Amino acid sequence: MAARNLAILTRQFSTSTSRQALVKTPIPVYGIEGRYSAALFSAANKKDALEAVEKDLGTLSGLMKTDPRLSEFLLDPSVKKGLKVDGLTGACDKLGFSELTKNLLLAMADNNRVPYIDAVATSYATLMAAHRGEIVCTVTTAKPLEADMVAEVEGALNGFLKANEKALVSYAIDPTIVGGMVVAIGDKFVDMSMSTKLNKYSELIKGAA
């Protein structure tokens, strides 16, 4: 019976069937993780469980980062598929995850897609942000920005958004960009880093030599 139920769940969330009869996602998502997250978004939307599933995935993703034993167990390719299915079943029951979340995770385990769990959680979170009219923005600089510059950057980012949209801004530090910044707004990407400019100048100089 367990094997039969798992086969049904796998068909429900498989990458081949997830393209069919889906509720349209607020933004496109790509790759294996995108197909799973889109299928889950569709199922959760129909069951009015979007936020519950988002919370479940965030909890599991967080646990995989803070619990080395759980992460090693799930990501170890030598651990048999059946053991991972049993482990995820127990974890979902203990954590009180919704049936939709549990079904997806079991299907992923049965399809040997467990390494994509964190990517699926990230993709689903992106869909939920878009669903709420939030636009995920990432600003990468060589060093932390001063408070006045943060305000200026966020003001500029808001200028790219529609009236009903809200920017969710996160900041990252990457010394290799030397100066300037790299900005991602949703699926758009702008590279204003000094390292990129220097590379372009270097190529121009080489071409003129």
Image (cartoon, rainbow, N blue to C red):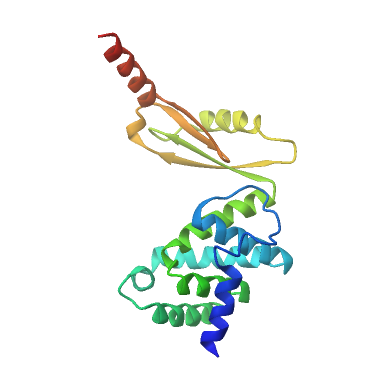
Residue 199 showing in the rendered view:
yes
The residue located at (58%, 51%) in the rendering is 126
At horizontal 69% and vertical 51% (from top left) the residue drawn is 132
Q: Is residue 2 above or below residue 114?
A: below
Looking at this view, name the residue that lies furthest to the left. Answer: 209
- Tell me how many marks there are: 0
Relative depth, front residue between 8 and 177: 8
Q: Is residue 39 above or below residue 169?
A: below
Quadrant of the rendering where the N terminus is positioned: bottom right
Quadrant showing the C terminus: top left
Residue 188: x and y, percent?
Answer: 56, 35
133 relative position to 31: left or right = right
User: Does residue 65 lie above or below 99 as drawn?
Assistant: above
Image quadrant in which you'd find residue 143: top left
Which residue occupies the foreground of this view, 83 or 55?
83
Residue 4, given in percent of the width and then of the height, sits at 55, 85
Q: Work out which residue is located at the far top of the displayed protein and give it.
A: 208
Task: Please name the residue shown 58% across and 57% down the image.
Answer: 124
Image coordinates for residue 152, horizontal then vertical, percent: 57, 28
Q: Nearer the viewer, residue 174 or 116?
A: 116
- Front residue of this view, candidates 30 and 117: 30
Relative to 134, is 84 on the left or the right? left
Q: Which picture quadrant has residue 163? A: top right
The residue at the point 51 percent across, 28 percent down is 149
**Residue 173's quadrant in the figure?**
top left
For the question of whether residue 102 can be seen, the reply is no
Residue ranking furthest to the bottom = 1
**Residue 109 spot, x, y in % from top left:** 46, 73
